[in-house]
Amino acid sequence: MNLPNCPKCNSEYVYEDGILLVCPECAYEWDPNEVAAAEEGLVVLDSNGTRLADGDTVTVIKDLKVKGAPKDIKQGTRVKNIRLVEGDHNIDCKIDGFGAMKLKSEFVKKI
Ligand SMILES: [Zn+2]
């Protein structure tokens, strides 16, 4: 059987453990059947594990440094009308005073 690469770190050394697939490099374990279901729609979870959707409003839960910006995005900053995207920084948004920005969903909370 041809096993997929690890979805977290893209390792090729994934092995099967019962119904789960396990990555020896980053220790990620997942159910390949669940991944197949998730691929039908982008699943992005906030810091509480709440699923986010396009158009949601979130707040930033910690001060975030912004490359090239003179100031941080402050904890509690409201971000309206987010858009979910693939990748490490999985939220596309606009923040007052900063402009277009990408955030990690783990640093926000749905309002
Ligand atoms: Zn991995």
Image: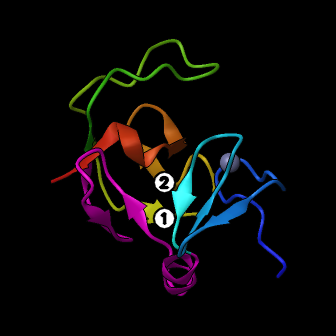
Query: Which stretch appears magenta?
Result: 32-58
Tell me the number on the disc at residue 91. 2
The residue drawn where x is 39% and y is 71% is 54
Q: Is residue 40 magenta?
A: yes
* Mark 2 → mark 1, Cα distance in angstroms: 5 Å
Q: Secondary structure at mark 1?
A: strand
Q: Is residue 90 magenta?
A: no
Q: Residues within 10 Å of mark 2 (few under 14, many from 20)?
A: many
Look at the picture and state if 79 lies above or below 67: below
Residue 83 rendering spot, x and y as whole percentages: 46, 64
Give the color scheme: rainbow, by chain, secondary structure or one colour: rainbow
Q: Which residue is mark 1?
A: 84
Instruction: Report the amino acid beneath label 1.
Output: Leu
**Mark 2 and mark 1 residues within 8 Å of each other at the beta carbon:** yes
**98 lies left or right of 55:** right
The residue drawn where x is 62% and y is 21% is 67
Residue 70 rendering spot, x and y as whole percentages: 52, 12
Query: How many numbered badges does the structure rendering display?
Result: 2
The C terminus: image quadrant: bottom left
Look at the picture and state if 5 lies above or below 33: above
